[in-house]
Amino acid sequence: MQCKQSPGITLLFLIVLSTSAFGQKGKKDFQNEINQKTASIEPKVISWYEDIHENPELSNREFRTAMLVAKHLERLDIEVTTGIAHTGVVGVLKGGLPGPVIAIRADMDALPVVEEADLPFASKVRTTYNDQEVGVMHACGHDAHVACLMGAAEVLAGMRKQLKGTILFIFQPAEEGAPAGEEGGAELMVQEGIFNNLQPEAVFALHTDGRFDAGTLAVRPYGMCAGADQLEIIVKGKQSHGAFPWLGNDPIVVASQIVVGLQVIPSRQLDMTKALSLVTIGSIHGGVRGNIIPNEVRMLGTIRTFDTDIREDFHRRIRQTAQSIAEASGATAEVIISGSNPVTFNDPELLTKMTPTLLKVTGEGNLITPSVEMGAEDFPFLTQNAKGLYFYLGVRTPGKEIESQHSPTYYVDESSLQLGVRALSSLAIDYLNGR
């Protein structure tokens, strides 16, 4: 997928473009009914959110959450399939009238984080992750995603006779990444056939964002989140006593030079005017004692890009830089790039079509055009054969400090949940009914 940034296209331009697409008259406006249904179930949505927050589960271990979701969908007389990609749940709601297929996704997994938020329903869960004792916390808002989609499913199930088409409700495990040695997430759900019988035209998803106040939504066309690749570099030298480094070949020194050398690539070798890119080394391991130079150093990192061509060039330069620096010192460097997530790409035509819906549910001044996001998502695996629309749900209490995702104090202002339900429900109704 070629993901070029187009700063000239703004939401204002999209609104102008969409006038003709939504200028048809005589079609029923379901917004009042959606608003009433959403308001009536708000206490339930908040209760689901608090329950899931208090009982978080790590990737591929979302058993309780999946059961909660499946039972709710079954009560709504929605066709349910469980156990997809380990713990994933898919509900199928067939409308009373013929029409296209769309999908809405919510991710379910929590993170290995010890919660520090001052909440009466704060997580106290502890478990083992990668052989370490960890806390578990919904530090990214996936609890809110699940609650909002459960709410949207209830709203839309109550309007099924009016729906022109079919909705897939996708409750996805392991968005944060499967545990070591396992597969998971959106890619595995697709591999296991969630779209084999019903291929959606469009897939929608929201994500909480503490940068924006509750009551707001944020969306932009083209690249919304970066593509991400996992990076591993294994530097091999020659072990020796720390007092006699000339008798060995120090891979720690070589690894240090590689870390610095990698930073030169995005800042000096790639055209930053075309698209953003970065490389980060977050883990370096080598040696067991201060007076022993080890044989080997292992580095782990991440690569972020917004453009296919730049991504391929970046990978080539990373390999060349690491291997050349190592060779110059008489060492070797093995570069492994894997675990790729594509760019989260908002189809501009779809966003043009749905912008009036987003404006309708937020009200004037509450639909924001955010900057590009260097964080990454596996949502794009669901949009390989469909148009995608991914947007942020503002969850910050106005006037409070910003809490970053993955922070132990991350929180969601519960007043934002109703807007999340309303936005997902309205996008589904308006797309299917062609307004």
Image (spheres, rainbow, N blue to C red):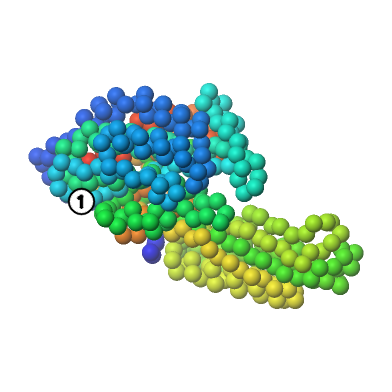
Where is residue 37 drawn, in percent x and y?
A: 26, 28
**Identity of the residue furthest to the left in this view:** 26
Q: Is residue 408 left or right of residue 417?
A: right
Q: Nearer the viewer, residue 254 or 400?
A: 254
Q: The disc labelled 1 sits on which kind of residue?
A: Pro
Is residue 300 something that shows in the picture?
yes
Residue at x-position 30% and y-position 57%:
196
Residue at x-position 60% and y-position 36%:
126
Where is residue 56 drawn, in percent x and y?
A: 51, 36
Q: Nearer the viewer, residue 412 or 214?
A: 412
Q: Is residue 154 left or right of residue 67?
A: left
Where is residue 403 drawn, in percent x and y?
A: 53, 36
Residue under label 1:
100
Q: Quadrant of the C terminus?
A: top left
Looking at the image, residue 425 lies above or below residue 83: above
Looking at the image, residue 240 lies above or below residue 388: below
Residue at x-position 82% and y-position 64%:
293
- Tag 1's secondary structure? strand
Looking at the image, residue 48 lies above or below residue 428: above
Residue at x-position 33% and y-position 53%:
194
Q: Residues within 10 Å of mark 1 (few under 14, many from 20)?
A: some
Q: Nearer the viewer, residue 203 or 274?
A: 203
